Image (spheres, rainbow, N blue to C red):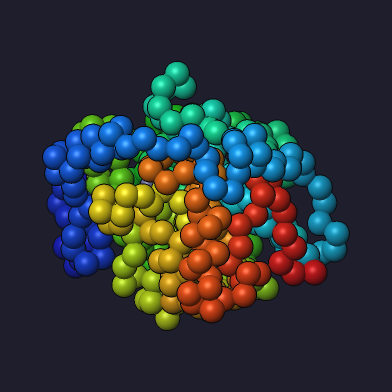
């Protein structure tokens, strides 16, 4: 680990660990148990209770359009973990992925079940792309190369170690950040923050690059993006140091079965808890409805988030799910 700093609790000579010093590590026997139980079940045909089939998910094709006023701020969910935040003079995009598959090769691995609402050509100029970690559903080579080609000015902010992958693709305008590192661009402060997760792109690079979430403090809007995470104490700390947030994008999908997934992916219940701990005024659920990564039907977060809101006494509008490609206005 070329970044190894013995004074930092999440640094190890061979890579990184979570903020409490632990790693997400499941023995091979657990992985085999998950596969066995998964294929042993006679699961109803997906999606499930709320959508008749994949085509029933509404998709709103996204096309760039100017802001309606210089003070307007808006956000669009471009499927999975991709969120576009548009402000006058600074557009930010999280974990862009518009391709068919989330896998090293395009002929195997989890395929997109709902059509991408956008392509890179449909987007406005992107000033900053933030990457949460190097898993294939968050860091798509094709999409990132398209973005870099479209504008060499686009800056990619990435977790420590991930810049090497970008450089190997020929993307030079990349900057690696550690947890709590800050970078200010056009009066907007980007902070890379901890998450409870892991990283890997090959069989040999597990946890050699860092993972996390992003806090983006624009003068008129404080934004939080969770990345992929299990529940941890990190969120109280993020809320304390960088909150309250006006708007958050928090993962609400890929959480079943709990005995296997809890350590790496929050469920809607925990997402609402995190919404409260980071002190978010309004949140949207992301990381759902796009790739079938785990056991719950693709539409199950719709019901589970509604239950979680009820349990925590949240109004529907405070933590909602958008349609693929939907834009909401955060400030006028
Ligand atoms: Zn991940
Ligand atoms: Zn993911």
Q: Nearer the viewer, residue 299 or 266?
A: 299
Q: Nearer the viewer, residue 236 or 294?
A: 294
Position of residue 223 measured from the top left corner of the image (x, y, whole percent):
57, 66
Q: Nearer the viewer, residue 115 or 83?
A: 115
Residue 12 against residue 271 in the figure, above or below: above
Q: Identify the image quadrant of residue 74.
A: bottom right
Does residue 216 appear in the picture of this structure? no
Residue 108 against residue 292 in the figure, above or below: above
Q: Residue furthest top?
A: 107
Give the number of callouts: 0
Position of residue 64 measured from the top left corner of the image (x, y, whole percent):
77, 44
Position of residue 196 measured from the top left corner of the image (x, y, whole percent):
31, 59
Instruction: Please name the residue shown 41% across and 59% down the image.
Output: 267
Does residue 50 appear in the picture of this structure? yes
Instruction: Please name the residue shown 44% across and 55% down the image.
Output: 227
Instruction: Please name the residue shown 26% across and 39% down the image.
Output: 37
Q: Identify the image quadrant of residue 51.
A: top right
Position of residue 39 measured from the top left corner of the image (x, y, whole percent):
30, 32
């Amino acid at each position: 680990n070329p970044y190894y700093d013995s004074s930092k609790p999440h640094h190890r000579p061979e890579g990184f660990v979570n903020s409490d010093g632990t790693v997400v590590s499941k023995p091979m026997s657990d992985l085999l148990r998950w596969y066995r139980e998964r294929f042993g079940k006679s699961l109803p045909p997906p999606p499930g209770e709320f959508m008749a089939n994949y085509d029933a998910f509404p998709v709103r094709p996204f096309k760039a359009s100017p802001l309606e006023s210089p003070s307007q701020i808006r956000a669009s969910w471009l499927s999975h973990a991709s969120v576009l935040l548009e402000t006058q003079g600074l557009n930010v995009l999280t974990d862009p992925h518009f391709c068919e598959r989330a896998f090293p090769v395009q002929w195997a691995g989890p395929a997109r079940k709902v059509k991408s609402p956008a392509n890179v050509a449909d987007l406005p100029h992107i000033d900053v792309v933030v990457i949460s970690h190097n898993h294939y559903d968050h860091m798509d080579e094709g999409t990132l190369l398209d973005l870099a080609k479209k504008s060499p000015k686009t800056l990619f902010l990435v977790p420590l170690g991930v810049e090497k992958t970008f450089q190997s693709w020929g993307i030079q305008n990349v900057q690696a950040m550690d947890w709590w590192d800050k970078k200010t661009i056009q009066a907007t402060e980007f902070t890379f923050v901890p998450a409870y997760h892991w990283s890997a792109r090959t069989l040999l690079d597990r946890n050699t690059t860092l993972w996390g979430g992003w806090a983006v403090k624009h003068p008129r809007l404080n934004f939080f993006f969770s990345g992929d995470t299990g529940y941890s104490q990190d969120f109280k700390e993020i809320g304390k140091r960088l909150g309250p947030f006006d708007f958050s994008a928090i993962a609400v999908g890929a959480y079943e079965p709990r005995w296997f997934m809890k350590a790496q992916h929050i469920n809607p219940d925990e997402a609402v808890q995190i919404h409260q701990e980071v002190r978010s005024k309004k949140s949207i659920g992301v990381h759902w409805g796009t790739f079938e990564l785990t056991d719950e039907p693709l539409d199950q977060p719709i019901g589970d988030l509604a239950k979680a809101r009820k349990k925590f006494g949240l109004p529907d509008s405070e933590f909602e799910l958008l349609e693929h490609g939907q834009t909401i206005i955060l400030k006028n």
